[in-house]
Amino acid sequence: MGETFAISKYPDADKIINQLDRLIKEPIYTIHPNKLQDYVENYFNQKCAKSKALIEEARKIIPGGVQHNLAFNYPFPLVITKAEGAYLYDLDGNRYYDFLQAGGPTVLGSNPTEVRSKVIELLNDCGPSTGLFHEYEYKLAKKISEHIKAVEMFRMLGSGTEACMAAIRVARLATKKKNILKMGGAYHGWSDQLAYGIRVPGSKWTQANGVPRNCFKYIQEFFPNDLNDLEKKLRLNKLRGGTAAVMIEPVGPESGTRPLHYEFNKGVEKLCRKYGALLIFDEVVTAFRIGMSGAQGYFGVSPDLTVFGKVVAGGYPSAGGLGGKKEYMKYLSAGIGGGGKHKKALVGGTMAANPLSCVAGYYTLCEIERINAPQKAGLFADQLIAGLQRLNEKYNLPFVAFNQGSICHLETVGTMHFSINWSKPWQIPGILKATSERKKEMEHMGAAYMAEGIVTLAGSRLYTSAAYEDKMLPDILSRFENVFKSVAVKA
Ligand SMILES: Cc1ncc(COP(=O)(O)O)c(C=O)c1O
């Protein structure tokens, strides 16, 4: 029997893009300031007092008070003490529906016993790391390559960021070309070169504070959904020594915030073959979330290199890896003196491929497969999105709700739907100002959801997991409704 995926019906990308185009032309719709004030005073200050006190202390020693980019700073970050299934609990004992899911790795829900018990067993036996080889490194690699055809070999690394860095190093070594073409707006971690064109397509270096511009000499971006633009740039690169790789997020930049046409990935694959560039699929979010064979299985594409992260260690630390065809993976052969006569890519990491991440990853994948977690989470997401769309209509709001399986988007301000056109440079400051103003309101919406017991990713994205059950849906939607009821045009 064929694999069932998380995506039950591929979204109509044009329809969603039109809605998003309309959304960013609308004035900002956001939580009414009086209601926001009410949430701050009567929820955060009253019911989250212990979190508030701890964060005030933490701010003295930790920049901003928190260590993680996905923690909400408005009005102050909450201190989470317990995570279980679909729920999170804070220091004051409040319970939340968890749609952040640690940023994506916990497709099974938080802290599943099936994985935890195996991790504890391993910790009792050998502790988290030895710096040598552990059998679970092999078991995890084998499991991944059994499910993903294009992954003939796999090397575990410390994070998605590191795996993306490794991917472009391998591509450059294998092709002896230097240029990398990335999809505008896509996020491939925070390494110097891949900070180019993040969040907003066309933004080039403008979002990469702290990175000198000459780091971007061999990296360019192309516009999502635009194969002509990609081909134009591939052709141009022929005059500049060729393209080593084209790198994409297969559901669209920022986990599909701008969805792609179904045929787009195949089109990119064809162009890569035509111009001799490697195709790199960044499946940090999509692998084992869209399905066991990843987004590449769903779209029927065979990338040369696949980047892994997040789910690959099931929410445990050191989640990253690179997989691909043998002829390319040979550049990643590790170990002292190992690896044949060819050059090796510079790749490392003291904590990369530690037994703890590998055992957690292995049993996470076994359990995802056993219960078909991608499909379960995807079906719940379909219902959640349908419910949010009904609420948008009921309250006559321009918000855009859509999903690709268990990756859900609830765009209230459309911050990442802007793009920059360098042939009209006078527009750029206005666009950057509009995106930051809208982002502020996205944070306010995020705080409002939080006060209603719903944790989102940055106020605009929601990951569902297999821990969600249909019976939770009415309660979840009524919490969203409490927020939507109090939305007004920003004065
Ligand atoms: C598509 C994608 N690639 C790469 C990364 C970077 O992974 P990490 O945060 O593990 O460095 C992320 C992280 O969110 C991501 O979403």
Image (cartoon, grey):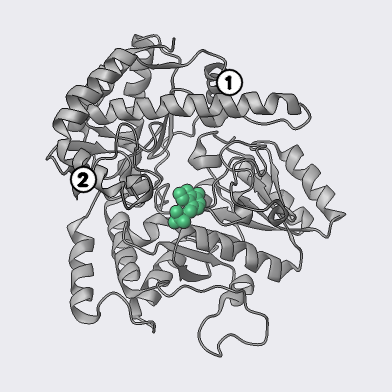
Whole-angstrom CA distance, mark 2 to mark 1, is: 41 Å
Q: Residue furthest left?
A: 93
Q: Nearer the viewer, residue 118 or 161?
A: 161
Which quadrant of the structure image shows residue 469?
A: top left
User: According to the image, label 1 marks what residue?
Assistant: 21
Residue for point 52% across, 62% down: 163
Above or below, 123 against 11 in this view is: below
Q: Quadrant of the C terminus?
A: top left
Amino acid type of disc 2?
Leu
Amino acid type of disc 1?
Asp
Q: Position of residue 290 (x, y in %)?
A: 43, 47
Residue count near mark 2 (Cα–Cα under 10 Å), binned few <14, some 14–19, many ≥20: some
Q: Residue furthest bottom?
A: 337
Above or below, 423 against 238 in this view is: above
Residue at disc 1, secondary structure: helix
User: According to the image, label 2 marks what residue?
Assistant: 54
